[in-house]
Image: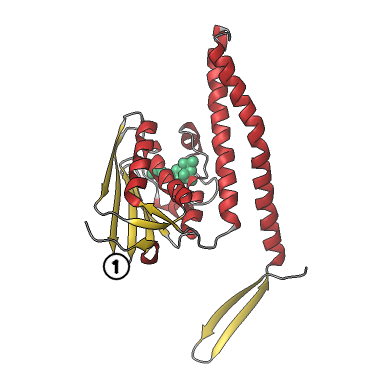
Amino acid sequence: NDSRMLQLELTRYGRDEALVIVRDITRLHNLEQMRRDFVANVSHELRTPLTVIAGYLETLDGSGQAPQTWTRPMAQMREQTARMTALVNDLLLLARLETSERETGREKVSVNELMERVAQEARSFSGGRHEISVDCRRESILIGDATELHSAFANLVLNAVKYSPAGGPVELRWWEDGRGGHFSVRDSGIGIDPIHIPRLTERFYRVDAGRSRDSGGTGLGLAIVKHVLLRHGAEMTVDSSPGRGSTFTLHFPARRLVATSPA
Ligand code: ADP
């Protein structure tokens, strides 16, 4: 079993000269694979103990037998257990997504239903402080993986809520044009300095780590979005200015849409 992984790079010089660089990236590729497997295994192993801890906390809480002085520590424990569970789930999901960047998904996903669902989830997350609107004027169907698409849409919408601490409108929009279908989420929150934008989809990259943690962020949301997009031939653009808010837009190619009549 001595298959090699080679990377080819071709640079043209004028009409009839070219430089070809061949790199043997077998070792790098294997190391990446080991890293992914390791993360997936650790995350998987952490799930059982977390479930047990969360279970006992709930039992103790519901029993009414915990002393009064435990109220705060117990609330802390519940919160931190929930955070760790979210982190482990995100790590596991990301590890799964990273194993294959090949395009995926043959399910027919109703864009309207998906948008209504994530809007509803965001409303309950926001606790009524944000006005979450959905503007989708046609019955669009996306071809892809329903669970992955839900995670991508939900991450953007929850971020819009998390990063507009003062409340305010969050607008979800879908439209189609000659190039394909576009989903955008606009908030009027804290915004992002342009220097951070190219790095937002890196694992654990945060503009403000404290704020991200306080709002329950794992630092993996946009990395997950990026991998879901890779698997759907889609791209993301970000338009943001500090203090004014952000718009995240996902662009799906026309081949990912089922042709429907305009509404
Ligand atoms: P997190 O769990 O920290 O939210 P993400 O990967 O979802 O992780 O986002 C990475 C970082 O990008 C966040 O920590 C935050 O600094 C910034 N960010 C993402 N969405 C927004 C938004 N709508 N407005 C302002 N900043 C955002």
Q: Is residue 142 left or right of residue 93?
A: left
Please provide percent x and percent y for residue 46.
66, 36
In the picture shown, does residue 198 fall above or below 9? Answer: above
Ligand 1 image position (quadrant): top left
Q: Position of residue 245 (x, y in %)?
A: 32, 44
Describe residue 34's horizontal placement relative to residue 259 as left or right. Answer: right
Q: Residue at x 39, y 46 (%)?
A: 192
Image quadrant occupied by the C terminus = bottom left
The residue closer to the viewer here, 179 or 77, is 179
- On screen, residue 26 versus residue 165, left or right, reads right
The total of numbered circles placed on residues is 1
Looking at the rendered structure, the secondary structure element under dot 1 is loop
Q: Residues within 10 Å of mark 1 (few under 14, many from 20)?
A: few
**Based on the displayed image, in which of its 4 quarters is residue 157 positioned?**
top left
Position in image of residue 116 (x %, y %): 33, 42
Query: In the displayed structure, would residue 12 be above or below residue 227?
Result: below
Which amino acid type corresponds to the residue marked 1 in the rendered image?
Answer: Gly
Residue 203 visible somewhere in the drawing: yes
Name the residue rendered at 67%, 62% in the picture.
29
**Residue 73 visible in this rendered orientation of the protein:** no
- Tell me the residue that label 1 is attached to: 178
User: Measuring 36% from the left and 61% from the top, which residue is drawn there?
Assistant: 257
Q: 8 or 233, which is in the foreground?
A: 233
> Which quadrant would the N terminus be assigned to in this image?
bottom right
Q: Position of residue 32 (x, y in %)?
A: 66, 57
